Image: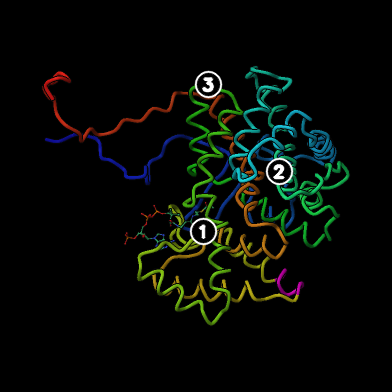
Amino acid sequence: MNDKPKIASGLEGVIAGRTSICKIDEDQCELFYGGYSIDDLALNSNFEEVTYLLLNGDLPDKKVLEDFCNKLSAEREIPVELINIIKELPRETDPMDVLKITVGILHTSDPDGTSNTDDANMRKAIRLIAKIPTIITYDYRITNDLEPVEPNARLSFASNFLCMLNGEEPESYKSDVLDKSLILYAEHGLNASTFTARVVASTLSDLHSAVMAAIGALKGPLHGGANERVMEMLLEIGDVEKAEPWIKKALSEKKRIMGFGHRVYKKQDPRNPIIKGLVKELGERLGNNRWFEISQKVEDIVTAEKGLHPNLDFYSSSAYYLLGIPIPLYTPIFVASRVTGWIAHVTEQYNDNRLIRPRSEYVGHERRKYIPLEDR
Ligand code: ACO
């Protein structure tokens, strides 16, 4: 009898641990952070409140939220040494690599140093979440010969991001779209980057190392990198009339259509109707329905041809494009949001840790006779 454990390719369907951070109900197409539906959070909450929820497990009251927002906005500045390092990096450095490098440097300068207590990690978390948007926008402006715009503690997380990027305070309907997309991106169970962060944390390495590794995992086009590829595809299609031949050709060449499909959701990504509605509304408000119309056409064809549905990355791309955000910043924005989920999982891992160490089935050569170099 063969009682060898079965291999789950890509770890599909494997339950690798317990969590109370996020529940994915793929059958009902629902997603909950700490028991709160993503629909309710996107409609009523903001990114700062969701960040508090993910880090603490509960929604804050007014006073607690105000204190938390003040702590976050007070930590937005980045050290001069870090700005100088960003200036020294080769211009063509990928913004995701800039994030990995700078998060590593923030570890060495963090006032809590190597301390791994809950309190120290909460302070480190707030610093990291607050500083990542500053790094993204400073790097963008420096590499484009623009003067960096200092963070403005008076503005919300989303407004401040757009202000540091463009040099002017955004209209509130624009920062609302970014804010809601940040809520949707914040957490999603044991996705590849969060799993990576938990593997690193399970060795009892530090929070910053877990975040750096997670950034590396998110960068790939099958994960967070997809949102940039989606916009490149939409731009290449360029016209609603060209969508059908473009997609059919790509599918006949066995290409993957970015922004479609999901390991867990086979019926619908519950975040999709929310971001899709936002893009439609934003396009109407800006008098530019082109990207929504092309996207809708692409969705119709891919769903009819392959039975695949859009994931969060698909319509997020047009939202960011309509907001005037440069394409190379789409995945870094995903980092700015998902870092909250990563940190929540890293903390959960530390609090009930066991080293994550799976096995593999060996399929290589059986024992071979070693032949000395001179006889080969
Ligand atoms: N376009 C075309 N075909 C696809 C796509 C796609 N986007 N997604 C899956 N398929 C096909 C595969 O080619 C494969 O077909 P085959 O059986 O004929 O070879 C089949 O569907 C199953 O594909 P898998 O890769 O095994 O499915 P998996 O569950 O592992 O994939 C993934 C999930 C990686 C997200 C996949 O759907 C994909 O590559 N999508 C495009 C990239 C993307 O949008 N990533 C973002 C993910 S969500 C996020 O990070 C927020």
- Say what secondary structure mark 3 lies in: loop
Q: What's the residue at 35%, 30% (across, down)?
A: 358
Q: Please provide the residue range marked out in magenta.
A: 281-286
In the image, 107 versus 308, the foreground residue is 107
Q: Which amino acid does label 2 sit on?
A: Asp
Q: Mark 1 points at which residue?
A: 29
Dot 2 or dot 3: first in sequence order is: 2
* Whole-percent x, y for residue 280 in the image: 67, 71
Query: What amino acid is labelled 3 in the image?
Result: Leu
**Does 56 appear in magenta?**
no
Within 10 Å of disc 1 (Cα), the crowding (few <14, some 14-19, many 20+) is some
Separation of marks 1 and 2 at Cα, in angstroms = 37 Å
Figure quadrant of the C terminus = top left
Residue 283 magenta: yes
Q: Which amino acid does label 1 sit on?
A: Cys
The answer to whether mark 1 and mark 2 are in CB contact below 8 A is: no
Q: In this view, does 374 lie to the left or right of 168?
A: left
Residue ID for mark 3: 204
